[in-house]
Image: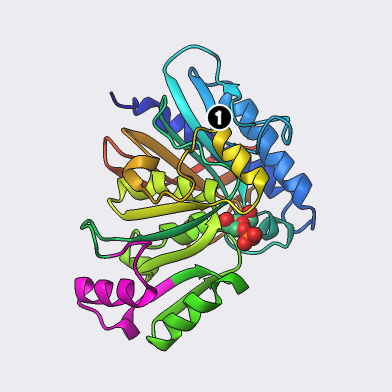
């Protein structure tokens, strides 16, 4: 089974409208309002589409989030059954502070084909390699870099690694520096960070480190169409994390997941820019119209492109 390509434009509208809603809060130093605007818009746009969707990654569980919570049924209740992962506003700090890189993101797969990721951290690794055993979460940083350097026929000093700039990554960053690997340190937004391995133009060879689990699943959906490698391993620090994981059916809490276990079958991924970043430009206004840029992938048709739309405000 595949996802009909007629849905692509409809999902692009969902993230474009959510990005627009959030764009009015750019630079207002109000993360909550920016997130709420994106969530409200995304939910009402999704409800216009002829699908039987279920949120598998969203704003949290019902006790934490009244909208787009995990398990919420979405769509106009007819049509095909889809699993839906959403991050209506990826990069709340970016919108609050008018900084580059805020996105509105969605990933759609067929029913039971998208991993139900708990709201915990995930150790991640990704690169544009289609062979096994080149990069692996179980390898040391040194081994990953030297394997990748051999595979790409590039010296480590000509490789670039993207990683969230966090104290928890000190050891990895020190190791990369020792090998003279160039760093692209990001302050937030690791969906975008992971996707920088997809094309030469971004000049990133490997993405690694610990970020949000839900963001890992969203990125994996797009990486699948680009035929990039991705692995993820959840980190369950607290008893509450472990309880939620078990409730979601995760038995082995230390399992390393391959991309093929995170996203199965066909998928659509859309990421619209709110503020301009590496992947897409942010929302712009021209008179009565707004312009949006959305990175879209559709696995079964191999579609991967930026769709630019100019449409009426309202
Ligand atoms: C990342 C990033 C997000 O959280 O997942 C990161 O993609 C991880 O959490 O944009 P910490 O900030 O706790 O390191 C964000 O930065 C914010 O949700």
The reply to whether residue 311 is in sight is no
Q: Does residue 203 appear to the left or right of 192 in the view shown?
A: left
Q: Residues within 10 Å of mark 1 (few under 14, many from 20)?
A: many
Residue 57 percent across, percent down from the top left: 55, 37
So how many labels did they put on this image? 1
Q: Quadrant of the C terminus?
A: top right
Q: Quadrant of the N terminus?
A: top left
In the image, 152 versus 64, the foreground residue is 64
Residue range in magenta is 135-161
Ligand 1, image quadrant it occupies: bottom right
Residue 224 percent across, percent down from the top left: 33, 46
Q: Which residue is mark 1?
A: 55
Residue located 27% across and 83% down the image: 155
Q: Quadrant of residue 156?
A: bottom left
Residue 310 vertical placement versus 179 (above, below): above
The reply to whether residue 78 is in sight is yes
Secondary structure type for disc 1: strand
In the image, 91 versus 208, the foreground residue is 208
Residue 279 vertical placement versus 73 (above, below): below
Residue 137 part of the magenta-drawn span:
yes
In the image, 25 versus 153, the foreground residue is 153
Q: Does residue 177 appear to the left or right of 66 in the view shown?
A: left
Colour mapping used in the image: rainbow
Residue 94 percent across, percent down from the top left: 66, 60
Q: Quadrant of residue 130?
A: bottom left
Residue located 47% across and 75% down the image: 172
């Amino acid at each position: 089974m595949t996802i009909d390509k007629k849905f692509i434009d409809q999902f692009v509208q969902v993230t474009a409208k959510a990005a627009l809603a959030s764009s009015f809060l750019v630079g207002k130093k109000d993360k909550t309002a920016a997130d709420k605007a994106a969530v409200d818009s995304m939910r009402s746009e999704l409800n216009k589409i002829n699908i039987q969707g279920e949120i598998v990654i969203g704003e949290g569980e019902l006790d934490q989030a009244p909208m787009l919570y995990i398990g919420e049924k979405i769509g106009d209740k007819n049509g095909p059954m889809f699993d839906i992962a959403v991050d209506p506003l990826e990069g709340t700090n970016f919108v609050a502070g008018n900084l580059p890189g805020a996105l509105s993101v969605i990933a759609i797969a067929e029913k039971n084909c998208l991993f139900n990721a708990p709201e915990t951290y995930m150790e991640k690794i990704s690169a544009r390699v289609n062979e096994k055993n080149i990069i692996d979460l179980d390898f040391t940083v040194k081994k990953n870099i030297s394997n990748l350097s051999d595979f790409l026929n590039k010296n480590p000093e000509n490789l670039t690694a993207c990683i969230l700039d966090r104290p928890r990554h000190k050891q990895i960053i020190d190791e990369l520096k020792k090998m003279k690997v160039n760093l692209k340190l990001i302050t937030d937004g690791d969906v975008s960070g992971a996707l920088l391995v997809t094309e030469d133009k971004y000049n990133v060879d490997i993405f690694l480190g610990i970020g949000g689990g839900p963001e890992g699943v969203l990125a994996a959906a797009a990486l699948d169409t680009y035929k990039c490698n991705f692995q993820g391993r959840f980190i369950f620090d607290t008893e509450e994390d472990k309880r939620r994981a078990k409730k979601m059916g995760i038995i082995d809490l230390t399992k390393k997941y391959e991309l093929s276990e995170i996203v199965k079958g066909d998928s659509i991924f859309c990421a619209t820019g709110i503020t301009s970043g590496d992947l897409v430009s942010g929302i712009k206004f021209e008179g009565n119209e707004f312009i949006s840029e959305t990175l879209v992938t559709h696995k079964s048709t191999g579609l991967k492109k930026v769709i630019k739309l100019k449409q009426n405000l309202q």
